[in-house]
Image (tube, rainbow, N blue to C red):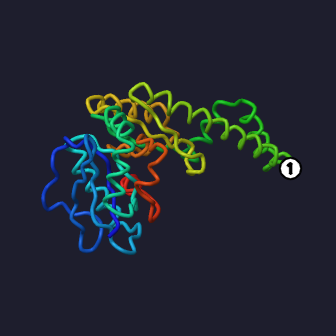
Amino acid sequence: MSTYVYGITASSHPALPEDMGGVGDPARPVRVLTQGRIAALVSDAPEGLRPKRRELLAHSNVLAEAGAAGCVLPMRFGSVSPDDETVLSVLAERADHYAERLAALEGKDEYNVKANHVEDAVLHRVLSENPELRAMTEANRQAGGGSYDDRLRLGEMVAAAVKAQEAQDATDVRHTLEPAAADISVGPDSSGWLANVSFLVARDGADAFLAAVGQLRKGHPHLEVRLNGPLPPYSFVEPGPGDSGLAETAGSGTAGEVARE
């Protein structure tokens, strides 16, 4: 029977509820594998596991329950190891790495911030801040829309101004929120957002971070700012070489992505 891995924690972590269920239908009982000072939260892995919402939430719920009692390094959904012995072997091999990450992430949560432009608002902003664009827009209006070349040139200039504003706003998101965070992790550029950044925030500093998000929204009304958290620190686990022996992903997505919807 293969082993499903939810997360890594210290062997001193408080016990989970005896009836804690995980992925699968029926839900597989969650248990703890302990190797020295490090432990893994696991269950038997169901066959044919797919990243359906029910399963993603089950994965997330185990991490939330465990995370409420102490630090947990979350594994991504679908992390499956051949058996318990393989998990224990990797825990022993990577003990120092896991211990360092647990110490670094203790008392901290992840907050994910995504930002994009509100189209009408950002167009108003770039026009209000660019006299040349305003003059060209007015000239075209008075000329009944302007010639094809005039419209093309104006469109290209507006697009360039919006692109420059995207870069500036992405920088502003980081600079406004980074001082209230212990660490940051920048998401891929292909996300479809002008900014997609995860922040590692101490729990006793959450109010300051949320206040900074409010400041960002107030100072940038042309932005749609989406905040999700607190989440398990998926973006800050930093699995080292050798963790591929612990779990092979059998599916895509993370429970954190469900929470971010």
Report the residue at 21% width, 58% height from top. 31
On the rendered image, what quadrant is the C terminus found in?
bottom left
User: Which of the 4 quarters of the picture holds residue 62?
Assistant: bottom left
Q: Could you tell me if residue 225 is visible in this image?
A: no
**Disc 1: which residue:** 147
Q: Could you tell me if residue 46 is visible in this image?
A: yes
Residue 221: x and y in percent read 49, 37
Report the residue at 45% width, 65% height from top. 251
Report the residue at 18% width, 60% height from top. 20
Furthest toward the left, the residue is: 18
Q: In this rendered view, identify the residue nearer to me: 224 or 148.
A: 224
- Going by the numbered disc 1, the residue's amino acid type is Ser
Residue 32: x and y in percent read 22, 54
How many C-alpha atoms fall within 10 Å of the one at disc 1: few (<14), some, or many (≥20)? few
User: Which of the 4 quarters of the picture holds residue 133?
Assistant: top right
Q: In this rendered view, identify the residue nearer to me: 52 or 237.
A: 237
Furthest toward the top, the residue is: 179
Q: In this rendered view, identify the residue nearer to me: 67 or 31.
A: 31
On the rendered image, what quadrant is the N terminus found in?
bottom left
Q: In this rendered view, identify the residue nearer to me: 97 or 160.
A: 97
Residue 105: x and y in percent read 33, 35
The image shows a total of numbered marks equal to: 1
Report the residue at 40% width, 59% height from top. 79
- Answer left or right for 19 relative to 55: left
- Answer left or right for 20 relative to 197: left
1 versus 9 height, above or below: below
Circle 1 sits in a helix, a strand or a loop, which is it?
loop
